[in-house]
Amino acid sequence: MRREEARNLKWADVSLKKRKIQIRESKTGKSRTIPISEKLCPYLESLPTRNNAYVFDGGDNSRIYAKGRYWKVLRQATESMGLRNIRVHDFRHTFAANLAMANVPLGIIQKLLGHTNIQQTVVYQDFYPERFQESIERLDFG
């Protein structure tokens, strides 16, 4: 998700049973549904905000991004893992690049990211040039 999509995400838009998230307020103005990984479900279920309106709640039924709290939370979490200077959008890029490395078709990556134009997504296919040799080895001339 984009930062603002996560910021506006309400528990009413999350179905752990169906493993789906409904993005209602996107950058493009269009809603979309994205799947939830089976491995992510337990983490979402354990969030202390389950009884609040927002998934990423600041503790007082307000968005975590209010008054800059999100930066503090992100910085604490990433620094505890030895990561520095991480932006929320870096997670989105990593997600897309990992999907591309796993040979997920660009059209699917486009839909998951909510890109309106495939050209926005194509950049992820060239993140890992070492895959070029791997791709060529798939050819069978025998």
Image (cartoon, grey):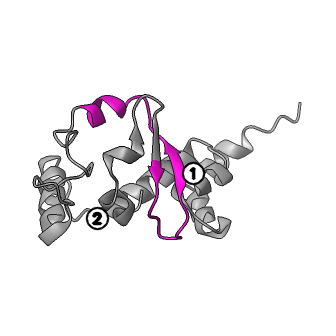
Q: Is residue 131 left or right of residue 17?
A: right
Q: Is residue 108 above or below residue 50?
A: below
In the picture, which quadrant includes the C terminus?
A: top right
Q: Is residue 54 left or right of residue 130?
A: left
Give the percent coordinates (x, y) of residue 80: 12, 48
Magenta stretch: includes residue 34: yes
Choose mark 2 or mark 1, whichever is in front: 2
Instruction: Give the residue displayed 19% in from the left and 43% down from the top.
Output: 49
The boundaries of the magenta stretch are 22-45
Q: Which kind of residue does numbered mark 1 sit on? A: Glu
Residue 86, picture quadrant: bottom left
- Name of the residue lying farthest toward the right: 142
Mark 2 secondary-structure assignment: loop
Q: Is residue 135 above or below residue 127?
A: above
Question: What is the crowding at mark 2: few (fewer than 14 residues within 10 Å), some, or many (at least 20)?
Answer: few
Q: Earlier in the sequence, mark 2 or mark 1?
A: 2
Q: Is residue 87 left or right of residue 121?
A: left
Instruction: Give the residue displayed 44% in from the left and 59% down from the top.
Output: 93
Give the percent coordinates (x, y) of residue 20: 47, 39
126 and 139: which is toward the camera: 126
> Which residue in the structure is indicated by mark 2?
87
Magenta stretch: includes residue 55: no
In the picture, which quadrant includes the N terminus?
A: bottom left
Q: Is residue 102 above or below residue 79?
A: above
Give the percent coordinates (x, y) of residue 7: 30, 61
Give the percent coordinates (x, y) of residue 96: 50, 53
Real-space Cα separation, disc 2 to disc 1, in angstroms: 26 Å
Instruction: Give the residue displayed 40% in from the left and 62% down from the top.
Output: 2
Q: Which kind of residue does numbered mark 2 sit on? A: Arg
> Which residue in the structure is indicated by mark 1?
130
